[in-house]
Image (tube, rainbow, N blue to C red):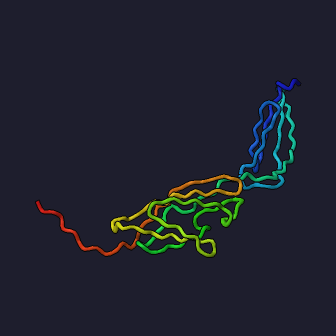
Amino acid sequence: TELANLTFEATSDDLNVSIDGTVATVSAKSDSYAGTTSFTLSVADSDGLSTSADVPVEVTEIANKAPIILIEDVQIKYNACTYLNLSEIASDDFTSYKKLIFNFEAENVTLDVIRSRKYQLRMYTDDPDMEFDTLFVTVTDDAGLSTSAKIIMYVNSLPNRAPKIAEIP
């Protein structure tokens, strides 16, 4: 039987297998999978005769992914401090949160590094009507992969203000 008359099919529970001509491309179905597994390769000819064989595969390297930002918002107090651990802000599949590089940007927030690798977020503003601010965060792992996000900081204890009377026409 000519090679052009053969039909190839591959099946696996753990692997994605695609066949283009006589080349099989194999990858793990899960990014976190590593270990020894196999796929079943079936070959059939134009007369309907077929055979199958298990092909062993060892997945040795897991692909590194960019860090993940874990929070979308945080409650902070007006003109007071709120504490966030780095591990509450982001995580990574290969790099410990202690080794991640954090870059914060905001107009109305002061960030001070304090003991135990915590970040102290201190909100300061002269505007008692400000109800929230945006903190822009970029997190980079050891391999240089980065993720950026906006974290909304809601102010939950604005100072007490005198009531306002609208102008009467």
Residue 27: percent from the left, percent from the top? 76, 45
Quarter of the image holding residue 137? bottom right
Left or right, 54 with reference to 79: right
Q: Position of residue 136 (x, y in %)?
A: 51, 57
Judge whether 32 appears above or below 124 on screen. above
Tell me what residue is drawn at x 23 percent, y 72 percent. Answer: 163
**Is residue 16 found left or right of 158 in the rendered image?**
right
Look at 77% across and 32% down and name the residue there: 20
Q: Is residue 158 left or right of residue 98?
A: left
On screen, residue 15 above or below 98: above
The residue positioned farthest toward the left in the image shown: 169
Foreground: 65 or 100? 100
| Percent x, y of residue 116 | 63, 75
- Residue 138 is situated, as x and y percent measured from the top left of the image, at 58, 56
The C terminus lies in quadrant: bottom left
Q: How many marks?
A: 0
Of residues 10 and 149, the one nearer the viewer is 149
Q: Is residue 92 left or right of residue 22?
A: left
Q: Residue drawn 46% across and 61% down?
A: 152
At horizontal 83% and vertical 32% (from top left) the residue drawn is 22
Dividing the image into 4 quarters, which one contains the N terminus? top right
